[in-house]
Image (cartoon, grey):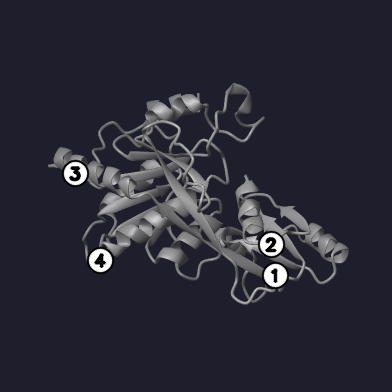
Amino acid sequence: MHRFAMRVSRDRAFVPAIPMVVVGALRAGGSGKTSVTLELARIFLGRGLRVAILAYRMGRGRRGADPDFSEVGDGDDWRLFSEEAVMLRRDTGARVFATRNRAYAWKRLHQYDVHGGRSFDLILSDDGFQDPRLDGAFRILLEAPGERPGLFDLLPGGHFRETRACRRRADLILQGPYQEGDLGEAREGASAYRFVRRIFLPQGLDRGRRWIAASSLGENSGFLACLRGAGINPVAVLEGRNHAAPPLGIIRSLEARFPGAGILCTRKDGVRWEGPDSPLPDFRVVDQEIRLETEIMDRISAYFRRFRGRAS
């Protein structure tokens, strides 16, 4: 019903002149959408392209700003937009726009003044696979190996947005995140590609200390598996709510239960917890690197060529 309503309301007169790559997933959280978007942004920025990124807007934005389209600044608080929007801005240096309506944002970016009036070469959208109004975009679907959601796995009862049948709408399917050394496993279908996640523990980390793992990705098993693979066995796991401030009551309880334990959190959680007024002085951020198979960029480059051919 949601997809039908969006399809009916789409602007059929709009003809996009800027290509868009959408990174979406079946699972509502923890699939790696933001991480893959960030890696794609780094690749395209390294090639000298002018990249705009669309990110989820949770907050109200600045006073008087367009509720459906706001640019994220360098020093903006995550509560104004979302932790994903602020993290993408900080980690890529690209222009990031927070929105609840990606189709509207796509149109706005065609008139947006950037670099002395020159338009963007590419738009990357963190999420938006389910939006049928993004006609003409290159849709990437992330899925975990063996992930086969059915009707009873969908929200609000489960963690998934659509059944596996939606794979047919994807231009490219990315399976993962795998850990290094796991790429010997067979792919699920010839059209699927893989991405690898590698984590980096904070420099000088005391591995002999007790650590509490904190993750609010929605699906936290991958982060925990990476920690254990790096030799960290958490004494407790704190699973917070997505897009929410740190649950201080639970954290204080865990600190009392495990005196002297530190907190290891994801990069996304670190955005919410950092700052001079942070109530959590003793936490360390675990960073990560995403590596994509080379054929993925070949597929996206082929989309660019087709898009320019249609536009001309």
Q: Is mark 3 on a helix, strand or loop?
A: helix
Q: Is residue 233 visible?
A: yes
- Image marks 2 and 3: residues in contact by CB distance under 8 Å: no
Q: Nearer the viewer, residue 25 or 207?
A: 207
The residue that mark 1 highlights is: 207
Name the residue at 23% across, 57% down.
Answer: 119
Earlier sequence position, callout 1 versus callout 3 = 1
Q: Which quadrant of the view contains residue 208?
A: bottom right
Alpha carbon separation for disc pair 4 and 3: 24 Å
Alpha carbon separation for disc pair 1 and 3: 49 Å
Residue 131's x, y, as percent? Answer: 42, 35
> Which circle marks residue 232 in the picture?
2
Tally of marks = 4
- Image marks 2 and 1: residues in contact by CB distance under 8 Å: yes
Earlier sequence position, callout 1 versus callout 4 = 4
Three-letter amino acid code at the position of disc 4: His
Q: How crowded is the residue under tag 2: few (<14 C-alpha within 10 Å), some, or many (20+)?
A: many
Q: How crowded is the residue under tag 3: few (<14 C-alpha within 10 Å), some, or many (20+)?
A: few
The residue that mark 3 highlights is: 305
The residue that mark 4 highlights is: 115
Up/down of 190 relative to 264, above or below: above
